[in-house]
Each structure stands twice: as C-alpha cells, then as structure tokens.
Amino acid sequence: MTTFEFAGRTHRSPERWASVGIIVAALLLGTAVFWRAERHPRTDDAEVFANLIGIAPQVEGPIVELKVHDNEFVRKGELLFVIDPRPYQYALEKAESAQSALEGQISDEQHRIAAQVSEVSVANAGIDTAQADVSHWAAGIDQASRRLQCRAGCRQSKG
C-alpha cells in the first residue's frame, strides 16, 4: 500500500465510526451526569448553595411526626410537623383544675358574703326593733310622768 491508496478511499473505516460513537456516548454521558448533579447534588465534604428557608414553631417541644420529606415542595399554611401535645395538655388540665378551685373559692366567698349581708340585715332589724322599743318605752315614761304630774297637781288643787 502506498500513500496514494489511502487517499483514494471514500468510505469511512470502522475504527473511525467507533471513535465518533465513543465521543458521542461520552458527550451524552457527561450531559446526563451534569444534569443529575445539578438536579440532585451530593457531596461528602463540599458546600452546596441552595435556597433555604428557616422555620420556627410558635411553641417548643419534641417533634412526634414529620409531615414533609427532604426537598418536598410545600405551600404556605401546610402542616410541616406535629409537636408532642402531652406537655400542653397537662398544662391545660392543671390550669383548668386551678380555675375550678378558684371558682369554688369564689363561690364560697360569695356564700360567706351573702351570709354576712343577711347577718347585717338581721342586726339592722334588731336595731330597728330596739329603737322602736326605746321609743315605746320613752312614750310610756312620758305618759307615766304626765300621770304623776297630773296626780300631783290634782292633789295640790284639792288640798
């Protein structure tokens, strides 16, 4: 074979097709790897920049149920996790118990006040009765004094 014989060939050799296929496959594989790395980043010791949104609950406590998974899309107002309600249920029951005790004390005090008001009413009635008795006895004394004066005056006029 001479140099001229190679120049005369017009068809491509299988080695050339294999080289083009390997290059195309490498490009496709590189594109797929790049796409996968962009969509689902994974690293052991590097930093990944992503949009992170911090969340904070209104109350604290241990989380008993997580309603979302990693990288899941969530909407505003959607339930993300459940906090253990037992401490808050206990605090509510304790507060309700204290409220009931205080309401009982208030009721007792209202009864005691009502009893004292009725005692004051009875005392006022006793005062009114005593004043009426004083007035009655004062009138009796006045009447008796007038009788005595009349008897004394009547004796002097007869005498």
Image: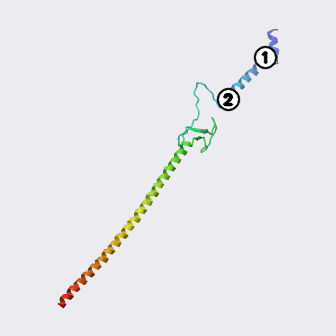
Nearest to the observer: residue 53 or residue 37: 53
Instruction: From this view, report whether residue 30 is shown above or below residue 110.
Output: above
**Which quadrant would residue 7 be assigned to in this image?**
top right
**According to the image, what is the colour scheme of the structure?**
rainbow
Residue of label 1: 15
Residue 95 in percent (x, y) is at 50, 48
Can you tell which of label 2 and label 1 is closer to the viewer?
Answer: 2
Alpha-carbon span between mark 2 and mark 1:
31 Å
Question: What amino acid is at disc 2?
Answer: Arg
Drawn side of residue 18 relative to residue 59, left or right? right
Question: What amino acid is at disc 1?
Answer: Glu
Nearest to the observer: residue 135 or residue 13: 135
Q: How dense is the environment of label 1, judged by Cα within 10 Å: few (below 14), some, or many (20 and up)? A: few
**Which quadrant would residue 131 be assigned to in this image?**
bottom left
Nearest to the observer: residue 16 or residue 38: 38
Q: How dense is the environment of label 2, judged by Cα within 10 Å: few (below 14), some, or many (20 and up)? A: few
Residue 135 in percent (x, y) is at 31, 76
Residue under the image location 59 percent in, 39 percent down: 64
Residue 25 in percent (x, y) is at 74, 23
Mark identifier at residue 57: none
Residue under the image location 53 percent in, 48 percent down: 93
Nearest to the observer: residue 158 or residue 106: 158
Instruction: From this view, report whether residue 159 is shown above or below residue 115.
Output: below
Label 2–label 1 contact, CB within 8 A = no
Drawn side of residue 36 relative to residue 94, left or right? right
Instruction: From this view, report whether residue 150 is shown above or below residue 53.
Output: below
Disc 1 element: helix
Residue of label 2: 36
**In the rendered image, which quarter contains the C terminus?**
bottom left
Instruction: From this view, report whether residue 74 is shown above or below residue 148.
Output: above
Residue under the image location 82 percent in, 11 percent down: 5
